[in-house]
Amino acid sequence: MKILCTVKRVTDPEVKLKIGADQKSIATDNLKYVLNPFDEIAVEEAIRLRDKHQGEVIVVSVGPSDVSTQLRTALAMGADRAIQIVHAGELDSDGVARLLQKVYEQEKPDVVLMGKLSVDNDSWQAGPLLAEYLGLPQATYASKNDSLESDNEKNKVPGITIEGTTATVVREADGGIETLKVQLPAVITTDLRLNIPRYPSLPNIMKAKKKEIKEHTPQSLGVDVTPKVRVLKFELPPARKAGVKVADSAELLAKLRSEAKVIS
Amino acid sequence: MTLSEEQTLLVKSVRDFCEKKVKPFARQWDKEQRFPKDVVRELGHLGVLGIVVPEALGGSGLGYVEYALVCEEVARYDGSLALTVASHNGLGSGHLGTFGTDAQKKKFMPMLARGEILGAWGLTEPGSGSDSAGMKTTAVKQGSKWILNGTKMFITQGTVAGCYVVLAVTNKEQRHRGITAFMLEPGMKGFTTRPIHDKLGMRSSDTAELIFENVELTDEHVVGEVGSGFIDTMKILDRGRISIAALGVGIIRGALEESLRYSKDRQAFGKPISDFQAIQWKLAAMATDYEAARLLTLRAAALADAKQPFSKEASMAKLFASEAAMRAATEAVQIHGGYGYTQEFPVERYLRDAKLLEIGEGTSEVQRMVIARHLLA
Ligand SMILES: Cc1cc2nc3c(=O)[nH]c(=O)nc-3n(C[C@H](O)[C@H](O)[C@H](O)COP(=O)(O)OP(=O)(O)OC[C@H]3O[C@@H](n4cnc5c(N)ncnc54)[C@H](O)[C@@H]3O)c2cc1C
């Protein structure tokens, strides 16, 4: 089985962001980057599926030349090879999906695994757009019935079940769980409770050094990535006002009733 | 000193692991003097328990620079766990992996490197520490057997190890050249251990006394040449000192990071205490000590990787980093004021843990002796 898995470099959620002077970008000085946590889960799931069904995991990323670090991380987790589409300029989800469409057509994988969102832009678009452009079935927000403390999780059993040419995906829906069967090839996006990604081991980090990262550009793939969605302005949320201290529960209830008006 | 992409990744992997699996629990382990077996096993899966062991023997096949980086990272979160990592890698499996026979290595190194068993190393005795050649433990040849008698003191992993390398006198007249290393397994007849509790620091690291009463060994248990045990030991200690230095580097970083956070937060006289120059000078000194200790440590490690002499440099790194760790931990407690004196903050633990670094694998006095001997040679 061939699994294509997308990874994106995102700004480290631990670092406090500053808005750039143009107000349309994030200031990049002192910025740190990590692998999008949802993609990390996708990579983990891809490796578990590969280990169970044989085959290979190909990770793909779009971004400036130094996203090779995030690709190396995925390779160190256990992916087999990587594709890097070098692009330093602006990019929207539509551009990403169109680039991935080309990679899909070249690689012809059985499954595409993607994070359901990336924690920086939070637009939840790339997966569904890709499925649409490819005319493939999709299952979004893949989760599982087992808990993250279960033995299955400890034994790294995949949460997505693949039998023949179908995949069974458990999705977290509002207030419940939905189980879907999709025909492969399909695009599956991963949610937080699907698995706990592994820490790359020291020997695997060294092995990753020897794995292939193949480079493309939007030009070489023949894709125009001029954004269709443009950021006009970023603003920080307003600073939170200081709270008030109440003397006792009676005062708290009175304030909730008369000032906050959240109870009656 | 810039790190390669792989080095950056391995530091990050160990750091992420420690943030999640060590940091939240280190205080409790210290309090209960509990050796965190499960986490140690997981460190084995990460490849942290066979850092310099060749891949062919189940290890990570890395060098001493990576070894130092990993020790720093673990020590940033927990000195005790870092002592486990350092002593297992450097002393127990280090001695067997470097001087053991092919048969011994084939049998034990893969298990040691994966952390399925832990290594321990017995040099110190109740009556001899700095003067380690003054040991009293003897191994006497009787026919085809060696009969081992004596006691070893303060042995890290003493009650939890699956493989012990123990030094014993095999020829009293020859002193330094009459000491031999032997390999023991737990459960051998006549071999018992007694845990040592209530240490000042490094409290969740396992420390024990080893007692040998007519333990029967054979030539297959001899590690290295008969009579070369002490010379080999000096080489093991040179490398071990790089890891103890790295523990110091990690503790300094912990002290600095905690102090930065606290001093920006804590208010006195209407402003954060980090606004006071007295506090700023302490922070500046800690940060400078961190960089200096780290450079000395990585330099000794890089020399070891390049197969150049590094004994003097390792002693300098160990001496400087352990004393700087004591300074940094003391200042961190000072910056935290009364709260620093309680277990509410980790800095008092750093102080207790740092003290061991000035004692273990050669006291500061011994390091100065070694350095001076090199200077005057
Ligand atoms: C937590 C812990 C873990 C340890 N783990 C291990 C282990 O795994 N394996 C192992 O073999 N050992 C281990 N040790 C033992 C450690 O290496 C010794 O404690 C150390 O080498 C000092 O020896 P000593 O305790 O006998 O002190 P001593 O040698 O008695 O020293 C007492 C004091 O005298 C000073 N002194 C001694 N000789 C001189 C001299 N010539 N000139 C100037 N000053 C001198 C010393 O510096 C020290 O200040 C461990 C110890 C501890 C506390």
Image (spheres, rainbow, N blue to C red):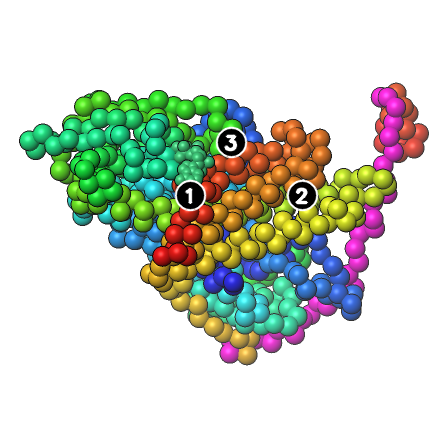
Q: CA distance from mark 3 to mark 1?
A: 21 Å
Which chain letter matches label 1?
A: B
B225 vs A112, nearest the viewer: B225
Q: Is residue B88 visible?
A: yes
Q: Give yes or no for contact between labels 3 and 1 (Cβ–Cβ under 8 Å).
A: no
Where residue A88 appears, as percent x and y from the top left, is: 61, 72
Q: Secondary structure at mark 2?
A: helix
Circle 2: is it few (<14), some (14-19), or many (20+) Cα within 10 Å?
Answer: many
Where residue A260 appears, as percent x and y from the top left, is: 88, 34
Amino acid type indicated by mark 1: Val
Q: Main SS type for the magenta part?
A: loop
Find the magenta span and give its range.
A220-249
Amino acid type indicated by mark 3: Gly
For label 1, being within 8 Å of ligand 1 is answered: yes
Q: Which residue is mark 1?
A: B366
Using the image, tell me which numbered label, if any, was put on residue B259: 2
Give the total of numbered labels: 3
Q: Secondary structure at mark 3?
A: loop
Residue in the picture at 41% in, 57% down: B375
Q: Which residue is mark 3?
A: B201
Q: Secondary structure at mark 1?
A: helix
For label 3, being within 8 Å of ligand 1 is answered: yes
Q: Nearer the viewer, mark 3 or mark 2?
A: 3
Residue B313 sits in quarter: bottom left
Q: Is A9 displayed left or right of B38 in the figure?
A: right
Q: Is A190 displayed left or right of B311 in the figure?
A: right
